[in-house]
Image: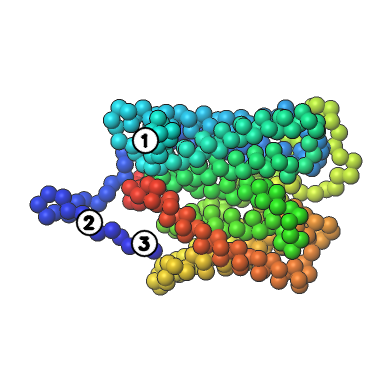
Amino acid sequence: MDPVPAPTLTGPGRPSPPDRPPRPQPAGAAGAYTVLAGTLMSLVGISWDVQWHVDVGPDTFFTLSHLMLYSGSAIAGIASLVMVLRATFAGRAGRPADPTVGGSPVRVLCGTFTAPLGYLVSGTGAALFLLYGLMDLWWHSLYGFDAVLNSPPHVALFISISLTMVGSVIIFASARARRWGRIGLVVSIPVLITFTPITTNAFNGVSPAVDPRLAGTVLFAVCFVLMGAITLRRRGVALSIAAVLGVMQVFLWWFSPWATKAYAAHVGLPLRDNLRHMPPELPSGIPMFMLAAALVIEALLRLGRRRGWSGRWLPQLTGAVGGLVLSSSMLMQTSMLHGGAGAGPMGPSTTSATAVLTDALLGLAFGALAGHLAARFAVLLHLNAPATDQEGR
């Protein structure tokens, strides 16, 4: 979709050789994957904590699921701080900043620090998370047990974790010329997709016509899958992201109920009396048919590039069709998992004509918006590290 840049002239009228990928940066890969490990730990911790609220109910500040959450954020934050200090010391020593390590450098505190953009975002999210953790501790000291997910401290914590995960995506996108960068991007995007509907849960009750978790799933899943495909410009990227998302769903489906029951038995707390045989809360909200939507996205992108369709409206078209497929599959998923009785985590489990039409319109609208945003996010990721546009090994 993007034009190939013309070669620049160096020397006596001779074109320069094609840009080669930057030399390997072991420290850059180590820092990036440490941040990713922290976000994965936070994701597992939040899935466990959500299941705890469903199966057990009230919790305190010092539970194992909370400690896993905070540990993941601390790991990501420490890694980000180390990489910021590394870039700062390199700049003071006169070595130019490498945009493949976390992205373009940003001057912080009047130039006191030089922070790669990705690590600045991830580190800021981690710092805010620990700050809001103190707010959560204060909240528990006032009200004791906390049995809801959309309390003010929890919403602030969820936004902070999401910010750290966004930083992880920026970090790997800046190293997309390297195989480890591309692999990390394919893994970091599903982590963000899995987590974002939890944050949109804060909008429950705002509008009875639109379920915020369903809208959030369609918007963010389509946006980030399409963004990854446009950013890497390789075949199969959307399918790879969807496949990794499925692996995460399978793991969390097993881990969350098991960890909740084992920990409740260890601390001597009973499970709720009215528990039904229901699927795990967070994993059941992850799109089970994301591969179908990713296949549609791959096909439309390939068709559009082959036929030379305008890049101004191809992302919106691809997003709208992908959103339609995803929203329809989520309606079917909810009906399968919750059987038409009551409401599932993604909204009412009815399959009436009204629900089908509403979800279809929601998928088209939010999918088109997702495509619009995905194209612009991909441009920003390319501008953040333009030297990595060439393929590397």
Residue 40 in the figure: left or right of residue 382: right
Q: CA distance from mark 2 to mark 1?
A: 26 Å
The residue tagged 3 is 2
Dot placed on the residue nearer the N-terminal end, 3 or 1: 3
Any part of residue 82 in sight: yes
The residue tagged 2 is 7
Label 2 sits on a secondary structure element that is loop
In the picture, which quadrant includes the N terminus? bottom left
The residue tagged 1 is 25
The residue closer to the viewer here, 258 or 220, is: 220
In this view, which residue lies farthest toward the left?
Answer: 12
Dot placed on the residue nearer the N-terminal end, 2 or 1: 2
Indicate the quadrant where residue 291 lies: bottom right
What residue is drawn where x is 25% and y is 51%?
18
The residue closer to the viewer here, 209 or 356, is: 209
**Above or below — where is 104 with respect to 316?**
above
What residue is drawn where x is 74% and y is 42%?
151
Dot placed on the residue nearer the N-terminal end, 2 or 3: 3
| Residue 100: percent from left, percent from top | 37, 41
Q: CA distance from mark 2 to mark 3?
A: 15 Å
Kindly identify the amino acid type of the residue bearing the numbered disc 1. Gln
Kindly identify the amino acid type of the residue bearing the numbered disc 2. Pro
| Residue 120: percent from left, percent from top | 47, 38
- As drawn, the label of residue 215 is none
In this view, which residue lies farthest toward the right?
Answer: 273
Label 1 sits on a secondary structure element that is loop
Q: Residues within 10 Å of mark 2 (few under 14, many from 20)?
A: few
Label 3 sits on a secondary structure element that is loop
Kindly identify the amino acid type of the residue bearing the numbered disc 3. Asp
